[in-house]
Image (tube, helix red, strand yellow):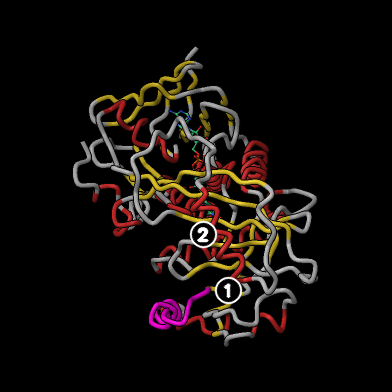
Amino acid sequence: MKQIGDVLVIGAGVIGAAIAFALTRAGNLRVTLLEKGPLAAGMTRRSAGLVHPFQAHPTLIQFALDSYAFYARAAELLGANKSEFVSTGAALLGGATDAAKIFAHAQMFASDAREVTTLARGALAAQYPGVSPQLYAGLFTPRAGYADAAQMTQRLTQAARQRGLTIATGAQVKQILLAQGRVRGALTTAGEYEAPLVIVAAGGWTDKTLATIGLTTQLQFQRGAILFYEQPPNMTQGHPLFWDVNGEFFLRPHPYHLSAAGMLSPQPQALQFDALDEYVAPDIARDVSEFVARVWSTPSAPPKRAHTIVYSVGAGGLPMLGQMPGAAGLFVAAGFGANAFAVAPAVGETIARMVTDTSAPSALSFFQPARAKDNS
Ligand SMILES: Cc1cc2nc3c(=O)[nH]c(=O)nc-3n(C[C@H](O)[C@H](O)[C@H](O)COP(=O)(O)OP(=O)(O)OC[C@H]3O[C@@H](n4cnc5c(N)ncnc54)[C@H](O)[C@@H]3O)c2cc1C
């Protein structure tokens, strides 16, 4: 039987869940979340869950700050009895030759100076035993932290369900439905869903889903790895997030006296998105271990476990967010690179405004999907 509603959200990763949550807060809409697997079946399950404002674009900085404010109040906002989010602060790390890059980041926070401070060499070691006194660090902000991204996605969808969200798992969208240049719903493996608004938040599967109506956002794929290390015994106070100014490495605390460190490949790669293997190449494991060794004052033991992750980025390294040209009522939210979790609540609010408030812009100029060279 055909299901009828107001908005369909395709994909229950953290972006789709945050959109569904914001839509159920925004008004009296019948919202359905369509997911081909279980909740958080895609890359969100593999995410490191970092939230920090050291982003590449001023709008993404604002999204990350707004999202941090959301996550910091997640228990209250999502009606949970405990918070999934751990507030740690974050340090932006640079080497001896990175002064110009650190300065460029600092400039983006110029109007917000009290919340982002410059760190002198050795400053973090004084506060966090176990952090190397030799460490070059650039900037520090208290407005950063991390969470288990899959659990947070579950929490967002549970909270949205209490406000009336319909969740259809095991419903793979096989065809977006169009009539006279407007979307009218989606045909899934679990039946047909009719709605005048459709938001594609299918992560790296976004273009495959859009291809059913001959559209594309031309997302590119990059690959990364996360490795888990035991913290040194002298690391009694834990440590903040560390984010490398070149965006290649990160290190964050993890429960059970572990830390999670990762590497993000700077180059787009041709990848089989549906057939992700778990192989972490020895040279990647070596580079990540070297980064950890730079941050900690004592050598780290080999990682205890590791996994890979693929993420997608839009043209120019910026996301695709807004109305798709060529199909009225069709929106897309994808290509957030290694920062989907960091900005998800703000993305949800932004898309909810775009689809519910006719006076709101239907895309942010730098992120508009129309910039893909050839949308059809
Ligand atoms: C090493 C590494 C570390 C990372 N760490 C972080 C981090 O710390 N912080 C951060 O912000 N980001 C991080 N990322 C990136 C981030 O985790 C992912 O990019 C993000 O989780 C993607 O979220 P999403 O909701 O867009 O996509 P996904 O989580 O992939 O969700 C898309 C969903 O859509 C569903 N779907 C697809 N096609 C269909 C269809 N046709 N019908 C129905 N459902 C469909 C999929 O099953 C999936 O559940 C990291 C990436 C890497 C490489």
Residue 204 drawn above or below residue 137: above
Nearer-the-camera pick, 119 or 21: 119
Q: CA distance from mark 2 to mark 1?
A: 19 Å
Q: Position of residue 24 (x, y in %)?
A: 57, 42
Which badge, 2 or 1, comes first in the chain's sequence? Answer: 1
Amino acid found under the numbered disc labelled 2: Asp
Amino acid found under the numbered disc labelled 1: Ala
- What range of the chain is rendered magenta? 93-106
Circle 1: is it few (<14), some (14-19), or many (20+) Cα within 10 Å? many
Q: Which residue is mark 1?
A: 91
The outermost residue toward the top is 1
Confirm whether residue 273 shows in the render.
Answer: yes
Nearer-the-camera pick, 258 or 352: 258
Nearer-the-camera pick, 243 or 371: 243
Magenta region includes residue 79 = no
Q: Which residue is mark 2?
A: 287
Dot label at residue 176: none
In screen coordinates, is 360 left or right of 24?
left
**Mark 1 secondary-structure assignment:** strand
Residue 373 drawn above or below residue 62: above
Instruction: Tell which tag, 2 or 1, sits nearer the viewer.
Output: 2
Give the image quarter of residue 46.
Answer: top right
